Amino acid sequence: IPVISLAGLIDLPKARVMDGTLRTYLYHSIFDIAGAACNEKFIWPLAILPVYSGFQSSMLDLVDRLSDSGKPDSRSLYFDFLNCNFKKAYPDFEENTFKGLCDCRLFRDETGLVMLRILALTRNTYKNTGALLSHLSLSFTTLVNEMAGNVRGPQVMLYYGPDMLRMGLGTDLEDESGDNMRQALGAMDDLYGMVRERIKNQSGDYSFELNVNPIVLKIKEAGDKWKGGAELRKTCAGFDFTSNAFLTQGIVRSRDALMRESCCYT
């Protein structure tokens, strides 16, 4: 979810934080994910129970933060929530590399937050954290700014984005060269840039939701023949998107299909 979406949590009445309403609402999201069409194997208890249990400590930390007398900022709240499971999944990298970098507030709010978001999209299963950090530090300015919420106007949400990245990476999660992730990040960077160009004259504090499920379906159709991040970037390059009249929602459509439709009306 975009950074701006946490504003509602920050403004949530303390009573709703403390009485279990927030926890119940967020826990139910796990079952929403399990019910998505791209998660047929996300079944009880083999897959859901570990996720549910792993979510527990992050949820308790979140409730504690929101219960404090002070008002946290959205980036700090987002970072701390994701960092809880990140430290468990990558203890050595966190202690030896990431922790020191996070002493810099700018790193935490930008590259650090985006790195946590990217890894969370893979359910913290991607292995080459060093390569990911390097890619985000040296390249993909559009992606980092978008996912850190450093933009003017609406913030972009890639609906089904977690499935697109996780499945789009394919089976090479060790990714020793780092190229698999580099290509996948390029695909996301291209999508964010495409949307930003279309909404650049929009103002207001809201999120634009781009549905990328058609790309996820392409990955599923390819099955074992899917070639990872490089194919994801190539596939995304073949898509444009259509949106509603208010520029609040859109869905990716293949450029070929849009061209055929255009020819039919001319």
Image: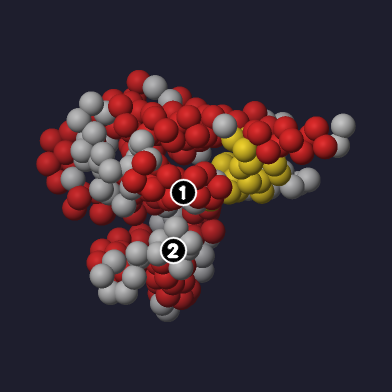
Do residues under tags 2 and 1 come within 8 Å of each other at their CB atoms?
Answer: no
Question: How is the protein colored in the picture?
Answer: secondary structure
Crowdedness of circle 2 by 10 Å Cα count: few (<14), some, many (20+)? some
Q: CA distance from mark 2 to mark 1?
A: 20 Å
Return the residue found at the far right: 266
Q: Which mark is residue 198?
A: none
Residue 166 in picture, x, y percent from top left:
37, 46
Circle 2: element type: helix
Name the residue located 34 percent from the left edge and 70 percent from the top edge. 43
Return the residue found at the far top: 138
Residue 216 visible in the picture: no
Mark found first going from the N terminus, 2 or 1 = 2
Crowdedness of circle 1 by 10 Å Cα count: few (<14), some, many (20+)? few
Q: Which residue is mark 1?
A: 221
Query: Which amino acid is tagged 2?
Result: Ile
Nearest the viewer among 48 and 40 is: 40
Residue 42 in picture, x, y percent from top left:
35, 65
Residue 188 in picture, x, y percent from top left:
47, 35
Name the residue located 74 percent from the left edge and 47 percent from the top edge. 244
Q: Which residue is mark 2?
A: 33
Quarter the C terminus occupies: top right
Residue 125 in picture, x, y percent from top left:
25, 48
